[in-house]
Image (cartoon, helix red, strand yellow):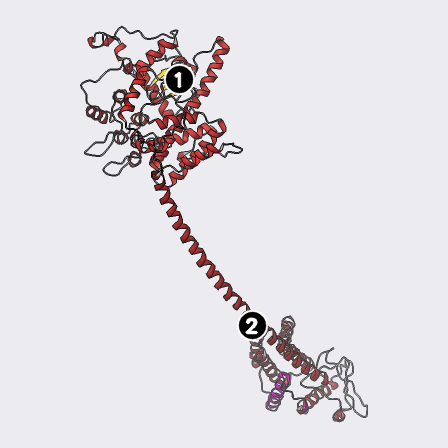
């Protein structure tokens, strides 16, 4: 997030170049605070010399701001003005500069302040020189100094040319490894400002981030993670004013762009830059980062100019609208940085969004180290010669910056030392990687096409098999339907036969029915029940001349005299004899009812002949228990989808006959005989329901319950 300084804090500082109060700008790599006038000159020096940032309106990391203020308060400016201090006045080797006067706040910007600032930072005329120290000595001192908290000493060594990426021959470690292991957060911050490689591995294949993780220094680990994404974070903050949350594993914040307008030339440039290798992409990232910083500073600067113009009524120095010439990088990069400044707002925003998307894609792929740290000086120098071939072109305008004579002379000497390659006529060097990529893509497309063809053949084969299986299923369904129709017709035929047979027989005795003789003599006998059958359809009661022997007795109403009880019992026995002796030869049709009738008639005749008065009540209890078990088995069978009730129904009938035959004659009073008749009728009712081809489970269950209730009542009465 953005860190702002209040006026109380700023009032205690002064500009490092002119001693003006309340500086509003800072140079990160120089570790000095500046006023607005001096900051305009620093802006013209270029970011390779001074990385200018506004103290109040730019984004600041708390760690970086703390480092800059710490260095400035501990005399970082004295390193740049060593020969202007009182302690160096007696040095005879600096007789030409010991009487040099530092500019004042009211001094002219040009040429007084401009010349002083260029001599101070570009030429380093006032900095202490280390004539007796070699490059190796500086590197060794830096390697040893980062172990301590003396950040100002590290800054002095870096200003004098110490390499922040120096590698120790024994351990393979850089100063960043050492500072990370010692937990020196300020040392790590300063080394990263000067281009330390965050991804370099020592002999143990350890990076600084891994070392901090192993040591458990979470604060340092979090800061190293932020430094890895410094370029992409700055672009995200420029676009939407927010920073990604790296602690939540959100490393990229990419806004959506709507309605951006690009020319065809700009679109071609975007297509070319996304196809660059990682080294070229890293240099592009650094150029875009510098252009973003330039635009941010330009916006802040013009806001300050407008404010000062309203107060003072005059326009002060105006900053350049492009990045100044950098003699360290090749000419094609200077030309590219000039072209970036010519992008309008929409085109530049679209470029930044495309760059963030490309960075994210490469980060998720391979070689992400070269993408995230585009400002690693070593990698940039290695890519200069190879990249110069790809980007050298006369289509670019010459840089509009006007270097000083001394700088121009140095630049000419540097150009003479290089042998500028010519652009190849046939562009074979450019076509080689493109040809390889095309061949790889063609192979992939060929394999995918072959796979698609194989899958198409497989789909056709499976479709044919599915069609065959569907035909078979249709035939099976038709056969099943035919069989079901045949079965239904057979069941209907059997049911019709059974119904016709039941209609031909008198299965139930109607209410107030009577047995009449040819002589029409009658006597009153108790009525058995209302609409309850004396016997099933398998045992019809014939009303013919055979009942003449008992013509004097008929059923008529309810009669209570005791002398009629004997006549009632005789009539029941006589009717049973008629049923058992009836000729059923004409009614045999191999049906389920006829089979039960034949077996039941024979069984009952045998049991009737063997019945004796010596039967006890305990047998009736046992038979009632057997009846309960048989009814339970019948109900279990009825719950099935295709019940087969013949054996269960036969078992129920057998137990009922055993109960009826087990009742002693001594107990066969009028009430007991009525209950026995009711039990037998319930049995026939259950048998009639179960003999139906389409059994109604509910009616069968009710009939079974009525049968069990009749048996219970008979048992209670016999007690």
The numbered mark at residue 476 is: 2
- Where residue 568 sits: x, y (%)? 72, 86
Residue 401 versus residue 252: which sits nearer the camera? 401
- Where residue 598 sits: x, y (%)? 62, 88
Residue 265 versus residue 184: which sits nearer the camera? 265
The numbered mark at residue 273 is: none
* Quadrant location, the C terminus: bottom right
Magenta segment, which residues?
586-615
Q: Is residue 114 above or below residue 225?
A: above
Name which residue lies at 52% across and 68% down: 468
Q: Is residue 652 left or right of residue 103?
A: right
- Where residue 467 sits: x, y (%)? 53, 66
Disc 1: which residue: 25
- Tell me if residue 601 is in the magenta stretch: yes
Name which residue lies at 48% across and 26% down: 344
* Quadrant location, the N terminus: top left
Q: Is residue 203 above or below residue 491?
A: above
- Tell me if residue 234 is in the magenta stretch: no
Q: Quadrant of residue 291?
A: top left
> Callout 1: few (<14), some (14-19), or many (20+) C-alpha neighbours within 10 Å?
many
Work out how far the residue at label 1 is from the one at label 2, CA to CA, in angstroms.
91 Å
């Amino acid at each position: 997030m953005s860190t702002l300084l209040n006026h109380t804090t700023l009032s205690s500082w002064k500009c490092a170049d002119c001693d003006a109060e309340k500086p509003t700008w800072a140079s990160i790599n120089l570790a000095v605070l500046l006023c607005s006038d001096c900051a305009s000159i620093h802006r013209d020096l270029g970011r390779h010399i001074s990385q200018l940032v506004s103290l109040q309106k730019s984004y600041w990391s708390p760690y970086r701001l703390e480092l800059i203020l710490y260095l400035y308060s501990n005399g970082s400016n004295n390193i740049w003005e060593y020969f202007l201090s009182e302690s160096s006045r007696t040095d005879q080797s600096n007789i030409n500069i010991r009487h040099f006067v530092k500019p004042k706040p009211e001094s002219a910007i040009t040429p007084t302040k401009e010349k002083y600032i260029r001599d101070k930072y570009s030429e380093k005329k006032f900095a202490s020189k280390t004539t007796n120290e070699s490059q190796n000595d500086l590197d060794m001192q830096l390697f040893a100094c980062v172990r301590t908290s003396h950040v100002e000493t590290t800054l002095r060594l870096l200003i004098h040319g110490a390499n922040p990426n120096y590698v120790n021959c024994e351990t393979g470690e850089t100063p960043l490894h050492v500072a990370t292991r010692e937990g020196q957060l300020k040392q790590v911050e300063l080394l990263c400002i000067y281009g330390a490689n965050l991804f370099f591995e020592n002999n143990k294949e350890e990076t600084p981030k891994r070392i901090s993780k192993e040591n458990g220094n979470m604060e340092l680990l979090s800061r190293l993670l932020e430094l890895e994404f410094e370029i992409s974070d700055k672009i995200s903050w420029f676009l939407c004013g927010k920073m990604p949350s790296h602690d939540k594993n959100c490393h990229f914040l990419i806004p959506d762009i709507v309605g951006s307008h690009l020319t065809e030339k700009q679109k071609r440039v975007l297509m070319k830059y996304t196809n660059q290798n990682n080294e070229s992409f890293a240099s592009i990232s650094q150029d875009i980062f510098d252009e973003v910083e330039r635009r941010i500073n330009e916006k802040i600067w013009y806001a300050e100019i407008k404010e000062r113009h309203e107060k003072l009524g005059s326009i002060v120095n105006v900053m350049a609208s492009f990045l100044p010439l950098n003699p360290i990088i090749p000419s094609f990069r200077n030309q590219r940085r000039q072209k970036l400044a010519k992008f309008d707002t929409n085109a530049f925003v679209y470029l930044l969004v495309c760059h963030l998307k490309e960075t994210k894609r490469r980060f998720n792929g391979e070689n992400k180290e070269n993408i995230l740290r585009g400002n690693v000086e070593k990698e940039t120098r290695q890519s200069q010669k190879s990249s110069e071939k790809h980007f050298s072109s006369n289509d670019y305008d010459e840089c509009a910056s006007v270097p000083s004579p001394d700088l121009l002379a140095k630049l000419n000497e540097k150009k003479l030392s290089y042998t500028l390659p010519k652009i190849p006529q046939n562009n074979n060097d450019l076509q080689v990687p493109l040809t390889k990529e095309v061949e790889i893509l063609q192979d992939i497309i060929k394999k995918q096409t072959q796979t698609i063809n194989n899958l198409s053949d497989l789909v056709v084969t499976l479709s044919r098999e599915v069609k065959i299986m569907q035909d078979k299923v249709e035939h099976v369904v038709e056969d099943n339907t035919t069989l079901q129709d045949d079965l239904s017709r057979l069941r209907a035929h059997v049911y019709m036969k059974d119904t016709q047979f039941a209609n031909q027989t008198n299965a139930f005795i109607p209410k107030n029915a009577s047995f009449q003789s040819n002589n029409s003599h009658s006597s009153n006998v108790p009525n058995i029940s209302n609409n309850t059958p004396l016997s099933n359809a398998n045992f019809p009661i014939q009303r013919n001349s055979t009942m003449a022997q008992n013509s004097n007795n008929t059923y008529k109403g309810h009669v209570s005299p005791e002398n009629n009880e004997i006549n009632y019992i005789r009539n029941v026995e006589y009717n049973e004899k008629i049923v058992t002796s009836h000729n059923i030869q004409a009614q045999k049709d191999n049906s389920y009812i006829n089979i039960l009738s034949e077996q039941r008639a024979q069984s009952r005749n045998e049991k009737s002949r063997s019945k004796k008065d010596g039967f006890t009540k305990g047998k009736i209890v046992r038979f009632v228990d057997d009846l309960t078990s048989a009814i339970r088995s019948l109900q279990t069978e009825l719950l099935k989808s295709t019940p087969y009730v013949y054996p269960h129904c036969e078992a129920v009938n057998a137990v009922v006959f055993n109960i009826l035959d087990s009742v002693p004659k001594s107990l066969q009073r009028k009430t007991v005989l009525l209950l026995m008749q009711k039990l037998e009728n319930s049995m026939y009712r259950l048998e009639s329901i179960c003999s139906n081809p389409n059994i109604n489970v509910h009616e069968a269950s009710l009939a079974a319950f009525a049968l069990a209730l009749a048996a219970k009542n008979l048992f209670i009465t016999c007690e």
